[in-house]
Amino acid sequence: MRFSQIFLPTLKESPSDAEVISHKLMTRAGMIRKVAAGIYNYLPLGLKVIRKVENIVREEMNRAGAQEVFMPMVIPSELWQESGRWNAYGKELLRIKDRHERDFCLGPTHEEVITDMVRREVRSYRELPRNLYQIQTKFRDEIRPRFGLMRGREFIMKDAYSFHATEEDAEREYQNMYDTYCRIFERCGLKFRAVEAETGAIGGKFSHEFMVLADTGEDAIASCNKCNYAANVEKAEIKIQGSGVRGLPPQALNGGQKPAPAGFKQGSEEKPLEKVSTPGMKSVEEVSGFLRTTPQKLIKTLIYHSDKGVVAALVRGDYEINESKLKKLLDAEWLNLADEETVRRTTNAPSGFAGPVGLNITMFADYSIQAVINGVTGANEADAHLINVNLNRDFKIDGFGDLRMVVSGDSCPRCADGNLEIFRGIEVGHVFKLGTKYSEAMNATFLNEKGQERPMIMGCYGIGIGRIAAASIEQNHDENGIIWPIPLAPFQAHLIPINVNDKATMDAAETVSKNLTDAGLDVLMDDRDERAGIKFNDADLIGIPVRLTIGSKTLKEGSVELKMRKSPEINLIKLDKVVEKISAIMRPAR
RNA sequence: CGGGGCGUAGCGCAGCCUGGUAGCGCACCUGCUUUGGGAGCAGGGUGUCGGAGGUUCGAAUCCUCUCGCCCCGACCA
């Protein structure tokens, strides 16, 4: 391909709305252009990368025994009514009407469609298992799309769904997909980690996320420095010492806490409860600073609103509530921090002054507060807090649980002496074991060998195609531009004839280009009549792995310059060795 | 949805406070010179100042409404 012909508009400056490096570089390198918030055009260079990713995914899925299908993007509401998600899914589901006023949605995921497809055809256990996948554009009307392809509204995703006669077979396939995903991300040249994850709105029993490690990632993951435990922080558990069973006498538990700060040792005398004035002091920092104590002494009381009613959640002042854990403990469908109005009604005080003493609603608490002796809480009246608050003497808790976010340095919940570290990651893949959630709701059944009707056991496995491209850039770039790993590179070799008006240079360039192309390589030749600086800078920006420079000086010796994008060295190679040399570089990665 | 900000040339921005004929850099077009890491000189403006309404002799500028976009938060496969 000639640079003068390809539609590849590079930019010297980043667009003002791009924040993360992958978004800036993809725009500058002429890969994508924004059409609307979270909606992009893919230009030729961007599409080439997308296709590379798709092909890796396709090859590995096929190798794993899955078969490709293609489902519609526009889905009739009936299917979503059947699964119950038409009402449950929320506003990310873009609902549209056709000319007959019939309801449809743009597919954000395809469990309903695939379940419908399979239930119509599959009758017997003999026709199972099945693993079907598609690579398709999805639409989720995200509240706040951002970061270019990392969190678009419209995005390309590979989604696979498997159907099984038995739990064991579904778990075998889950492992098969897990292994396949590892191979896919390895082939893409990504540094990643598989972590335990929440199952979220898609539902199901357990799941793993595949996280590309990057500081700009939107997810935080906790990872043990000794064993292979790794989990999304939404899910990451704390270590429970002794037994973590609900209902045990509170002080018997000490859920893996950091030692209490000096001066507040367990077992110190319980002092008399006292009310103190704390005008305008709401946050943990303000209150602990004002009262000259530490956040560890505070018990934070958060009022939540849920389908199970208004509840209070208590956690030690230096920790944060993990809403996923709270939701699970409550067995709630939904959960929100209560609004100011509800807080006032419940606590008789503006938010910031809630406390458990005398509070007349159901209260759940994180294990961490069991270690707090003579603690500080809100007084349930404006501008006042209570000091020397003690569990059981001054208030009672309806249930204890692991309700807090893990923090760096927490003990590993799985092994004896490991500690958790927190990393940021970009979720590029997710595998779920769905179980029978959809097959039961939608009556996707089969007859087993005894002639009994049973719901199919399902699994679901997604990969964000565009996110892989973006994540790769987050991991592979420098101040000049993208550095593509060979498997994802839009071209393998970038040829730069310095002076396109010099016949010898151009003849050599044409020959090299033809030879490399004949050898099966994708070559971009910068035949533009531009200054060398412009060509070199564009080459660095778009990040093709191999650069070959052809100039009249080295040409006299029958040589061209070879430079890898990822390293600064420049080597001369003879014209007749070019194909051999470049092929050797490409081989391991192809 | 709450808070904040921005919409002016293809891109990045100034002008707005204090109303008076639309600007800068880059890009683009023409010519000459230059030619191995984003060239120089000369000439050229390609604009519904996001949109609608209002105030005014006069609005990019002031007021009202509206649309779009971005950031923070909330929320979230």
Image: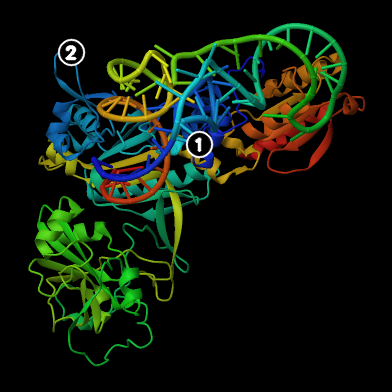
> Which residue occupies 71% across, 21% down?
A526
Compared with A144, A492 (above or below) is above
Q: How is the image coloured?
A: rainbow
CA distance separating discs 2 and 1 = 37 Å
The quadrant of the picture occupied by the N terminus of chain A is: top right
Asked whether residue A520 appears in the rendered view, the answer is no
x and y percentages locating residue A427 in the rendered image: 41, 46
Residue sitting nearer the eye, A256 or B10: B10
**Residue that extends furthest to the left in the rendered view of this protein:** A360
Q: Which amino acid is tagged 2?
A: Arg
Residue sitting nearer the eye, A377 or A482: A377
Q: Chain of mark 1?
A: A
> Which residue occupies 31% across, 37% down?
A142
**Which residue has dot 2 on it?**
A99
**Which residue has dot 1 on it?**
A23
In primary-sequence order, the first of circles 2 and 1 is 1
Give the crowd class for mark 1: few <14, some 14-19, many >=20 residues within 10 Å. many
**Residue that extends furthest to the bottom in the rendered view of this protein:** A269
Compared with A105, A376 (above or below) is below
Q: Which amino acid is tagged 1?
A: His
Report which quarter residue A279 is drawn in.
Answer: bottom left
Q: Chain of mark 2?
A: A
